[in-house]
Amino acid sequence: MNHSQLLELALNKTALQSKTYQLKTITPLGVHGASGSQFEAEFRIPSLRGVIRYWWRAVQHMDEPKELLQLETKKFGGTSVNAQKSPVAFVVEKPWIVRNYKKFVLPHKNSSPMTCLPEQKEIPVKMLVKRNEDVAFYENVFHLFSMLGSMGQRARRGFGSIQLSEYEDIDDFINELMRTLNYFGIDVMFNSSHSLKVRNYEKLSHPTIASIWFGRPYTSAWDVVIAYAKASSKNQTGMLGQVSDKKRNKKRFASPLWGSVKEIGGKYYPVITELQSQSITNMKKYENERNEFLEVLGVSI
């Protein structure tokens, strides 16, 4: 009995709703195996589940952490030994492991090589949902992640971008994105030809989608990753994210800007999602650095 069949039995011995997606890697994916080896890249379901949950939280406008956790546990399962089991599972039929493909983490400097899964690969991922659950909910969460997100190391700066659908042009992409956001009750409007903005947005304690920008088209996905690396140099004060540094008394701060790469009409677009929260304390300084970051990617401010 293979892994998929075992999961089907574990979720529900009767009928399951099942759908297989072709998950396409748009840029190199830096997710490493369970062994933790930096010399081995592996597509891992726990990593996929983690980012899917993250993007679900990003469209949840409730500011009570306990209630948010209860709802998340109901939809995706808990993390403790005796926690509620998840009504949804994601399965890959075979291991996807690479040991001999590297890309520079800082491509504009040709430094810090990282083992990755290559771009332009299709990975079949099966989604299994219990029969009495709303499969459309999980389909929309998966699509939301695929349109805005990415996974693995440097995911917020273009690495690990994936895609489930093809789009004829940027308008096709934006219309599908707006439909998906509306499914979750997120009302967005055009702030300009380059961006969408959430109406009546209020910052909460957890990061939620505030705005989405679309940069200029590039001829290759790797060129977009390089542009993200160059744009990151605008982060002079750490307002766009910083790593922890005990010696300098700096705490880790995840960037409010999630930059992914999407293949649209034969070209590659930077899609930058702003995920604001109450942790952003100096809005003026943040907005100045954010705008400089966006301009590098071809966004008109």
Image (tube, rainbow, N blue to C red):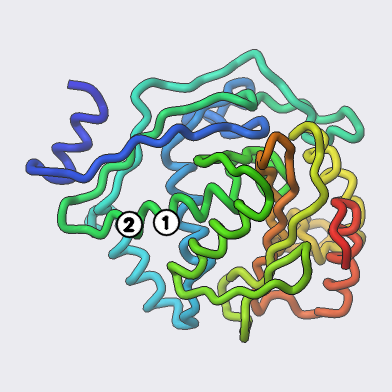
Marks 2,1: beta carbons within 8 A: yes
Q: Is residue 109 above or below residue 252?
A: above
Q: Report which residue position mark 2 lands on.
A: 136
Residue occupying image coordinates x 71% and y 21%? 102
Give residue 162's mark: none
Outermost residue toward the left?
A: 14
Residue occupying image coordinates x 35% and y 35%? 20
Residue 121 place in picture, x, y as percent: 56, 24
Q: Report which residue position mark 1 lands on.
A: 140
Question: Is disc 1 surrounded by few (<14), some (14 to 19) or many (20+) residues within 10 Å?
Answer: some
Element at badge 1? helix
Asked if residue 35 shows in the view, the reply is no
Outermost residue toward the top?
A: 100
Residue 171 place in picture, x, y as percent: 66, 55
Residue 67, by quadrant, is bottom left
Q: Is residue 81 above or below residue 229?
A: below
The amino acid beneath tag 1 is Asn
Distance in Å between CA atoms under marks 2 and 1: 6 Å
Element at badge 2? helix
Asked if residue 130 shows in the view, the reply is yes
The amino acid beneath tag 2 is Ala
In the displayed structure, does residue 9 sit left or right of residue 106?
A: left
- Closest to the observer, 175 or 134: 175
In the displayed structure, does residue 127 sit left or right of residue 174?
A: left
Residue 120, by quadrant, is top right
In the displayed structure, does residue 86 sit left or right of residue 151?
A: left
Residue 25 place in picture, x, y as percent: 59, 32
Residue occupying image coordinates x 49% and y 82%? 63
Location of the C terminus (image quadrant) = bottom right
- Closest to the observer, 213 or 98: 213
